[in-house]
Amino acid sequence: MSKVDRRIGKTQEAIKNAVIDLMSEKNFDEITIRDISDRANVSRGTIYLHYLDKYDLLDKLVESHINELREICIMGADLDYFSGSPLWTEYFERNYSFFSFMLASKGAPFFRTRFLDFLIEQFKQEVDVAEGKNQGLKDELIVRFVASAFVGVVEWWFTNNKPIPHHVLAEHLGLLFERNL
Amino acid sequence: MSKVDRRIGKTQEAIKNAVIDLMSEKNFDEITIRDISDRANVSRGTIYLHYLDKYDLLDKLVESHINELREICIMGADLDYFSGSPLWTEYFERNYSFFSFMLASKGAPFFRTRFLDFLIEQFKQEVDVAEGKNQGLKDELIVRFVASAFVGVVEWWFTNNKPIPHHVLAEHLGLLFERNL
DNA sequence: AAACCTTTGTTCACTAATTAACAAATTGCG
DNA sequence: CGCAATTTGTTAATTAGTGAACAAAGGTTT
């Protein structure tokens, strides 16, 4: 596979960081392409070379975060729930402003759906209905239950400004995953 | 005057930041162009487009710091010594790793000379030998005295790992400037 | 409602940076 | 000391990003 020109990565990173920065200052709808261009220190034309428009940029931002979460799932695949949960919650901590915004904004329904779908996809690989605590139960329902609960808790954590430290959140999630999956 | 392409500034900033970063990890002589290229995430060819070699890069780094100090002098021109000194010491604080290295390395003699010359140039504009405390004295000698003392104290502050906070340093320097200039 | 200002989206000729290749020099290791 | 590995410095074709200009659309002010 041919090597990708490093400028592409740098440009996209600058643009995405600019958007996240700006999101902590004002609503996404109030952010202009000109704002992003200034903050990222790239030309407006360059943004249009990479993204169709502002909403395409947001979609790609969501996707890149979902992909990073997927990497985390892969990394945590061999761990038990107690060991694996901090990987999630540390990631949430590092990306607090993005998630905080995405779960509280007008875009929240779209993002929540995207996030939920991703979680369902991941938990499907975890649940075992052939034996154990979920034997005889419908896997789709178990997965839907746990994914929805997870989103609900994560949303609470973000929209209530981290009422508990992320490692305490991890402990609780570990126990609840253990109990239900 | 035509506008300079923003990529030039971005590239030079990345290179300079990479050098400063690397200087806090190893001696400048141990740093390779390849190290800088990797850390700055720019190609080696690009470094050679901007700088003749590693030592030219160091020279330019020194010059850019001297120019920033010059800006500080201009900003402080209307202030008395007590008000003006913190501008210096805050700058030293912000750029601690660069100055710390430059005053302790093999390059120290060259840098000290460059720094001293700059201070002499600045203090020349401050001293008045026509009247006041320095009346009848040789301005060149007064200036040499104060500049050398200043470098000596600043060197002490850096090579002894900031034994006093920078604002305390500023107070002392203000008093000493007031006494001698 | 009209006028003015700002932003959007696009285009294009130009510029800066890139990748890869190369010979020469330097450094490190056995 | 010889050899291998790494780094240096350079080059050229290519690519990504640039600044500026433009028409159209949207937002703000009078």
Image (cartoon, coloured by chain):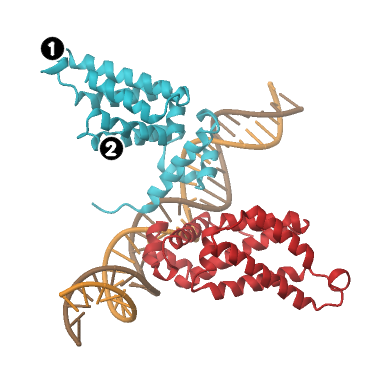
Chain colours: A red, B cyan, C brown, D orange
Q: Give the SS element for disc 1.
A: loop
Q: Residue furthest left?
A: B130
Q: On the picture, is A18 further left or further right than A163?
A: left
Q: Can residue A181 be seen from the camera position used here?
A: no
Whole-number angstrom distance, CA of label 1 to CA of label 2: 31 Å
Q: Residue at x 50, y 55 (%)?
A: A10
Q: Measured along the vertical axis of the image, is residue B36 above or below residue B9?
A: above
The answer to whether the residue labelled 1 contacts the one labelled 2, judged by CB atoms less than 8 Å apart, is: no
User: How many residues crowd mark 1 within 10 Å: few (<14), some (14–19), many (20+)?
Assistant: few
In percent of width and height, residue A97 lies at 51, 59
Q: Which residue is mark 1?
A: B136
**N-terminal label among 1 and 2:** 2
Q: Nearer the viewer, residue C24 or A21?
A: A21
**Outermost front residue:** A163
Asked where in the image residue C11 lies, by quadrant, the reply is: bottom left
What residue sits right under mark 2 in the picture?
A: B71
Q: Residue at the location (62% across, 60% down)?
A: A68
Q: Quadrant of residue B65?
A: top left
